[in-house]
Amino acid sequence: MSSSIAQQPLIKVVNLSWQVKGKVILQQLSFSLNKRQILGVIGPNGAGKTSLLRCLLNQQNDFSGDVYFKNKKLCHYSAKQVAKSFAVVTQKATPIFALSVFDVVRMGLLPHKGLFSLDNDYDRHQIELALDKVGLMPSIYSPYHVLSGGEQQRVLIARALVQKAEILILDEPTNHLDVYYQHQILQLVNSLGITVIMTVHDLNLAAQYCDRLLLLNHGKLISNDVPKNVLTSQALTDVFGLFCHQDTDPITQTPRVSFYLKKPQATAENMSMVK
Amino acid sequence: MKKYGLTFFTLAILLMVSGALALNFGPAQISMAEITHCIMGDCATPIHEMIIWEVRIPRILVGIVAGMGLAIAGAILQNTTRNPLADPYIFGIVSGAALGATIATITLSNELTIALPLAAFIGALFSVLIVVSISTALKNHEQLLLTGVAVSFMLTAISQFLLYLGEPFATNRVLFWLMGSLARVEMNNFYIIGSILLISFLVIVAYHRHIDALLLGDESAKSLGVNVNKLRLLMLALCAAITATVVAYCGGIGFVGLMIPHIVRQFIGVTTLPLIIGSALVGGSFLVWVDVGARSALESAELPLGIITSAIGSIFFIAIMLKSKAK
């Protein structure tokens, strides 16, 4: 998707390291991301995926190294400026009070509004437009907490649209979703045409929907490339500790990986595949 | 906000009607026509004029602002801590006020008209200061409520110890004050509570979007650029100021801050601006009627206000828990 060669990276991470009480969480990460690219962060549990997202959101200030956004250090942006550019979608948010879908999407106005400002017709229009885009206009007054996990994430994506964010950050958007909703949410994210950084557990989904992948293990960057070059049998076998086999999905032409607890026995049928 | 217009208008009318009707209640029998004449500045007797202008009107006005203040404080505490059971009284504010009142009553035998409210106010702020410093030390403002409960018990223990040692007359005085009443209020109390309320209201309107953002969790609010800890402290300080002023003049009136926002949430909404406007209007009406009840329940004497609100409130509390269990 990255078309122009001389494009300035939107985000550049240089030597990012983060330790908490002597424990290394992230180690010397460097990578960059162009506008409109979709970056998938993959790796086993505890690899540092979510920690990386936290650093990118400026929610940690005790890391070393630099994160640049539009060639300016992220720490030089105010919280409000960061909120205008970065929107977050997680599954962790569970409201205590009966917030409506409208109320949640309306929160996206916050970074663009001054103190004392009330909602106007234009704000309302924007909220409806965003909900329309994620296909949830019929649920505008439904309580947020009764929606399914996939729908809640779509509401948060609508909030990100109202927030007019340039970068959408998703923390494991496909967890707890069935196959249909996994594809629905990633298809939606893909269709927005904005820069996306997300952590993904399902490697085949990551291969299908991401332009680039970051493979992390123990806080270290193992590889950073297009899916085909990251999802190699050797690298995945090393990182996940399972035997991995990679081939190409005949329909989508994207890499496809399968894992085995033991080294697969070669039979007449799979002989050509297993090396 | 437009869709709430009619609801707020109705509630505002209800509040004004409540205030007007409440003028008719009191030990002295004054007819409706006479009251109307008095309000117009044409009283039949100076005694009636005094009763209307110096007793009943201040009492109703203070009742309204006190009810509004407690309801707003409750609503804000509940939204900022995301806990439907948060209430200024659970935060130790009243036990702090009680300690202040106890010390004033025991150490000073006279001059109590000014000293008692002042001591109560200082005591209330003192308790909030302790609660906030402990939760700051814990670096966890989510435990604000539990800290409040603990501090509340601690301060109550100290007050009770002092009262136990103190002379019975002083003890009686503090105990009666703690039960809450609008019997001793004056017009200047209305001005003071009213101004604190107005300032708080403006601050809340300024930050209403930030408070709304908290409703979906701290992480979510941070991602929208909200400084969560600062906001929570600011709102706690406002609630403390409102409650401390109300408690200083009216004594302990419990459960209003818990009950009213809960009712308002059911038929108006959970976002901050509609919630606090609705809570203020309903809270004002509620306390006016509770006070009418307090004046009329017994033939010869007044019932303390706090007894009525606590009785209604505790039943309400149990009802909430039963209802949320049924879900």
Image: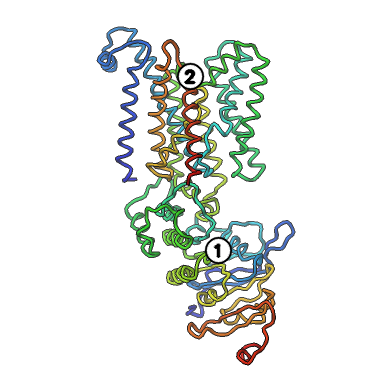
Give the quadrant of residue A15: bottom right
Percent from the top left, x then y, of residue A154? 44, 62
Q: Residue furthest right?
A: A22
Host chain of mark 2: B
Q: How is the image coloured?
A: rainbow
Label 2 crowd (10 A; few <14 / some 14-19 / many >=20): many
Count of numbered labels shown in the rendering: 2
Indicate which label's residue lies in the foreground, 1 or 2.
2
- Camera-nearest residue between A157 and A15: A157
Left or right: A241 as drawn, with respect to A103: right
Host chain of mark 1: A
- Quarter of the picture containing the C terminus of chain A is bottom right
Mark linked to residue A248: none
Say what secondary structure mark 1 lies in.
strand
Percent from the top left, x then y, of residue B219? 55, 54
Label 1 crowd (10 A; few <14 / some 14-19 / many >=20): some
Residue in the picture at 64% in, 87% down: A274
Residue in the picture at 38% in, 22% down: B60
- Camera-nearest residue between B138 and B268: B268
Mark linked to residue B304: 2
Asked if residue B190 is positioned above or below residue A37 in the image, the reply reads: above
Give the quadrant of residue A265: bottom right
Question: What is the CA distance from the residue labelled 1 to the residue labelled 2?
Answer: 55 Å
Whether residue A275 appears in this view of the structure is no
Q: Are marks 1 and 2 in contact (CB under 8 Å)?
A: no
Say what secondary structure mark 2 lies in.
loop
Whether residue B43 appears in this view of the structure is yes
Q: What amino acid type is highlighted by mark number 1? A: Asp
Mark linked to residue A171: 1
- Camera-nearest residue between A79 and A139: A139
- Camera-nearest residue between A31 and B181: B181
Percent from the top left, x then y, of residue B13? 30, 31
